[in-house]
Amino acid sequence: MSLLKEALTFATGILILVAFIVPMVGLAVGLPVNAPVLTANGVELPQIAPFASSLVATSSTVWDVVMNFDQDISTPAVVADGTPSFDFTNGTLQVVNDCGDANAKTYCFTYVPPSGIEAAVFWFFRVSGAANAANDYMATTTYRFIVDTAGPILSFTGVASTELPTVEGDSSFGSATVNITFSDASLSRTYQTTAAGGFWSLTLQPGDELPPGTYSIVAIGIDQYQNIGAPIVTSVTVPDTIPPVLAESAAIASSTNTTPSYTFTSSEFANLAYGGGCASQTLTAATGTNTIVFDALVPGDYPFCIITPTDGASNVGATLNVTAFTIALPPASNIPTDKDQCKKNGWKTFTNPSFKNQGDCVSFVEKKDHDDEDRMESDKKDKDDKERKNEDERQKKDQGNRDNRDSRRHN
């Protein structure tokens, strides 16, 4: 009995030893490959919550991604980016290669995130399919990061048309920086504001008034990752509320000139209206210096002449009061009436008309005498013709009266 007991005890010990050793061997053979440590530009991406990573892929991102395994890998991993909710169909497969070294534990790929993602979303790498030489495979593992590759989406909600315009709008990113540019052919100004709760607004301040005209307004949003959004465009028309201003450049000197010139300046193009006894055929003024000619004036004083400007926006400017001036009577005629007046340098004393020499003066008197004679003869002829005509008419009238009387007697 003791031999049998010993044999049974030994057999039992062998069974217990085998039962202990076999599971240990099973654990050492056919175990799955551990998930690698994945780094993007040297920053480790997390696999499980809490996700401590703040790594963000933006519109300018190009990452060098390295997968570090704890054993040699003979079958490279398959890597896709995207989100689990779309089963990673919203991303792309990455091109995984050896890192260019002799280390079979490391594999690499270059990552460029998808464009047009706004606003920031959680994004993932899904890594699967890596195996060692014994064809032990890793379990599918995801790594999380943030993707935001588009700038804020802006829209205009209102524009106030004044010389200090207000521009308002919405932003897809609640605290976007918004650059706003006003421009036309001769002016360009850029201002900056910050959205609050997705709403942004800008009002130009005194000193930044826009001149009258139509301006393009371009707004561009920038998010917290410096992604620049697409520009949006509208326009604003600043009304002209400023009247034209006229200013006298020089007063009119008193003279016998009945159509005097007058010079003044205008702050802008304007239509002109005249009053106070003066008028002109010039009905508009250009920006800058203008010279007009008054219509013919009779001799006398002109203290009340005015010019009133009106611009293209119907703004009426202040009346320009023309400094008082006088149109003088022309001097009395001073002409020689006898040839003797031309002698002994007498011809030099005449100014209206003036003469070149004594002969010129004598010729003037002779011509005037001749002209006077001709005029007298013409006047006498006209008088005689008129008297003959009147006599003929009188005789015809008398004859008519006699004929009427004779006719009545016969009847």
Image (spheres, helix red, strand yellow):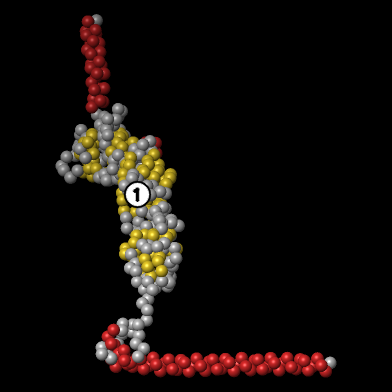
Percent from the top left, x then y, of residue 181? Answer: 33, 50
Asked where in the image residue 170 lies, by quadrant, the reply is top left
- Is residue 291 visible from the viewing direction of this image? no
Percent from the top left, x then y, of residue 237? Answer: 41, 53
Percent from the top left, x then y, of residue 313? Answer: 44, 57
Which residue lies most toward the right here? 411
Residue found at x 34% / y 60%: 247
Q: Amino acid at mark 1?
A: Glu
Q: Quadrant of the N terminus?
A: top left
The crowding category of the residue bearing disc 1, from other C-alpha atoms within 10 Å (few below 14, some 14 to 19, many at least 20), is few
Residue found at x 32% / y 55%: 187
Task: Quickly name the residue at label 1.
Answer: 209
Q: 55 or 392, which is in the foreground?
A: 392
Local SS, label 1: loop
Residue found at x 37% / y 79%: 332
- Residue 73 versus residue 14 in the image, above or below: below
Residue found at x 26% / y 25%: 26
- Residue 380 versus residue 42 in the image, above or below: below
Which residue lies most toward the top here? 1
Percent from the top left, x then y, of residue 73? Answer: 22, 38
